[in-house]
Image (spheres, rainbow, N blue to C red):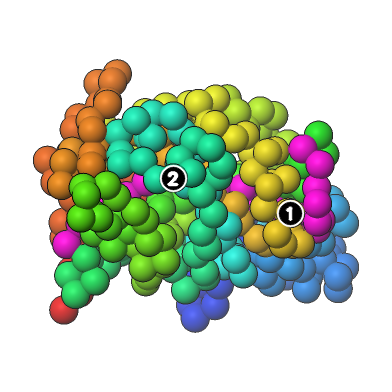
Amino acid sequence: MKIVSFQIEDALRVGLLDGHSIVDPLAVHAAEPFLTPHAQRALTDSTALIAAWDTVRPSCEEALSRSRASGAGRVLTSDAVLAAPLRPSTILCSGSNYHSHNQEKAASDVSGKEPEFFIKTSDCVIGPGQPIVHDRRLTSKLDGEAELAIVIGKPGRHIPVERALEHVFGYTVVNDVTARDRQVRRRADGSHWYELGRGKVFDTSAPLGPCITTRDEVPDPQNLMLRSWVNGELRQISSTSQMIWSVAELIHTFSLNLTLRPGMVIITGTPSGTAWSTDRELGGKWSGHSGMVPARGYLEPGDLVVCEIENIGRLENRVITLD
């Protein structure tokens, strides 16, 4: 099942993707009541839905069935305004998790040795179609990174690797937008060090969506094709099989620090093809392949960035300038 959030007048509603339509379970219920009060409450917010999924899923399946029979509660995706499918309380981020990305950039002291750990917040999140703001007072080197995002569904701490996927609700697409000149700093000897806070955490730095695909529709998260384009030019193409640390290993690692809770998100790193790879000033080394087009520079206002992951979705955002 694919879960979305969409705008109706001044309210956000939880919807279910069904072909080229979105089914609104609460609207289906309004036409012919069938939801329990518990299900109605859970369907008002995607995080509440995730937390209650085991009990509410049958209601979502019933809503789809009734809508297909009657046409109730349906809106065409072309007519809908999508928002981010959830507003995660915490986004736990793993950097340097693809060998190909490590080959194209200046190495940090832990690159390829352990997951680089940083955090984004819900303040960074925007949805599909919403603009990425290029604030030149913050950065002149704005870059994008297509990544698989894990949505946690079951709470846990110190989760063993072999049980980790049981804690997944589903998956979505994220663009880990980065201010490279804030992230990568040069020492006097020519080596580099990272400052992941200023370089990663800012307004509009976490486009997320367009939907959450539930875990049952992604039998192997380590076998998904990932691509990104800028203005139609292929920047990134890889498979999640190329991750250094798997989805299960990342869940285990982050659960050593924090209790993972429903609605938390873990993002899993990006492969080669970033604009950083063509920036020798910051230690970049181009290592593209398979028809990838090297970036001629960093993101600029007007650029259209598309991030796509097989069986999950296609996330599009345009860059604008901050007035």
- Residue 151, percent across and down? 64, 52
- 160 within the magenta span: yes
- The residue mark sitting in front, 2 or 1, is 2
**Count of labels shown?**
2
- Residue visible at 42% across and 66% down? 197
Q: Which residue is mark 1?
A: 256
- Residue 272, percent across and down? 34, 33
Q: Which residues are magenta?
A: 140-161
In the displayed structure image, the side of residue 193 where residue 266 appears, left or right = right
In depth, the one of 264 and 316 nearer the eye is 264
In depth, the one of 52 and 99 nearer the eye is 99
The earlier-in-sequence mark between 2 and 1 is 2
- Residue visible at 41% across and 60% down? 196
Question: What is the secondary structure assignment of the residue under circle 1?
Answer: loop
Question: What is the secondary structure assignment of the residue under circle 2?
Answer: loop
Q: Residue furthest left?
A: 296
Residue 109 tag number? 2
In depth, the one of 73 and 198 nearer the eye is 198
Q: Amino acid at mark 2?
A: Asp
> Height in image: 234 above or below 109?
above
- Residue visible at 65% across and 60% down? 264
- Residue 258, percent across and down? 72, 62
- Residue 280, percent across and down? 16, 41
Residue 206 lies in what quarter of the image? bottom left
